[in-house]
Image (spheres, grey):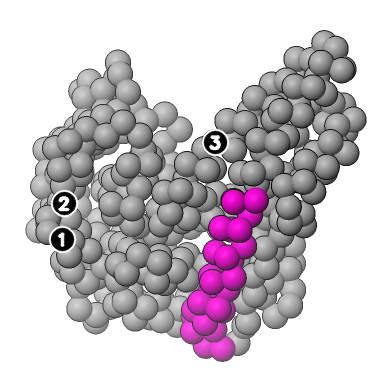
Amino acid sequence: MKLKTIELTNFRNYHTNKIEFGDGLNVIEGKNAQGKTNLVEAVYFCAVGKSFRATREKEVINWQSDIAKIKMTLEKEVGKKIIEIYFAKNQKKTIKIDGIPIKKIGELLGEVNAVFFAPDELKLIKDSPEDRRRFMDVSLSQTYKDYFYTLSKYNKILQSRNKCLKSYIDENALKQMLSIYNVQMASECLKIKKYRQKFVEKLTPYAKMVHEYLTNKKETLNLSYIGIEEETAEDIIKALNNNFEKDMHLGYTSFGIHRDDIKVTVNDIDVRAFGSQGQQRTSALSMKLAELEIIKQDTNAVPILILDDVLSELDDQRKMRLLKFCTKAQTLLTCTEFKFDIPCKKLIISDGNLVN
């Protein structure tokens, strides 16, 4: 799979632009606030159906317009694939694949796979378990549509269960209602747990290998999945029932796969709690680059690697090692200046325009 072109119309600070990409390393260079991140955001949008930074999708529409459009052309083994996303201020976005509108985001997932990393992704290590769950969910959803639909179903059940806990009047009636949700949750819990466990098991050796490469074998990374211990639906239902009093007091569900986490250690030290910022950054990058290998293994296609302003955060040795790694995939790398003697296609961006 190769990204060939992307056409942007009124997307962020781009008005009407068509940009062609090379098969290997694509360096997107320009001063700050010129539109480099906007360009890779559009690519990511076509992969997962949402932005990695916009809280409201309508934010991507140029302030001088009421509509915006992304058109991506891919080259796949089966031939050319075209993905189009339309935005309008007064209606929901519309997505088309080869000219045919889709009704659900799940139909888009897997058409183009992408792995994204930026300095902000340090939250993968530093912040709450929610960020590490999101990492698993985005990766698994791109690879397995069944996972995406199972997770969506679980989240709807969880939302309904929490709504009951917040608005209950009669305790017996609440118990009866929750017993229905508990059975529904148990089945989805087990499916999601198996996917996540396997994902971390497969990710760990790759992440360890990449981390040793980036640190010149000075550090050893290890990952471990932290989730529910229950192995059967009956055990999960029992655990949910045992937490009834606690949940009723808290007003939300305190047990389930929505509490999962990944423990990250470097040289056997919890890097989230005790690691330096450099260790945390390299650990997050290692996990992301390992994700590239996992998706490749599961789909037989190399995903697009998107690295947004990453070089500014690394020392010279790690920069060179990262750039050598980039030869394994079609890579979009944004930076303010690129002075490395490495084969690449350079795209100079200025004020939302390609100038070279």
Q: Identify the residue at horizontal 17%, vertical 36% (top origin).
A: 100
Position of residue 64 in the picture relative to residue 289 (left or right): left
Q: Is residue 203 above or below residue 82?
A: below
Q: Is residue 331 above or below residue 32?
A: below
The Cα–Cα distance between marks 3 and 1, rounded to whole angstroms, is 32 Å
Tell me residue 78's x, y (percent): 15, 60
- Please name the residue that numbered disc 1 is placed on: 78
Tell me residue 51's x, y (percent): 38, 41
Q: Give the mark nearer the N terminus: 3 vs 1.
A: 1
Q: Amino acid at mark 3?
A: Lys
Tell me residue 133's x, y (percent): 59, 51
- Please name the residue that numbered disc 3 is placed on: 153
Is 207 contained in the magenta span? Answer: yes
Cβ–Cβ below 8 Å for labels 2 and 1? Answer: yes
Q: Secondary structure at mark 1?
A: loop
Position of residue 267 in the picture relative to residue 319 (left or right): right
Q: Give the mark nearer the N terminus: 3 vs 2.
A: 2
The Cα–Cα distance between marks 3 and 2, rounded to whole angstroms, is 29 Å
The quadrant where residue 97 appears: top left
Position of residue 101 in the picture relative to residue 261 (left or right): left
The main secondary structure of the magenta stretch is helix
Q: Amino acid at mark 1?
A: Val
Query: Magenta part of the protein: which range?
Result: 190-217
The Cα–Cα distance between marks 2 and 1, rounded to whole angstroms, is 9 Å
Identify which residue, 354 or 138, lies in the foreground: 138
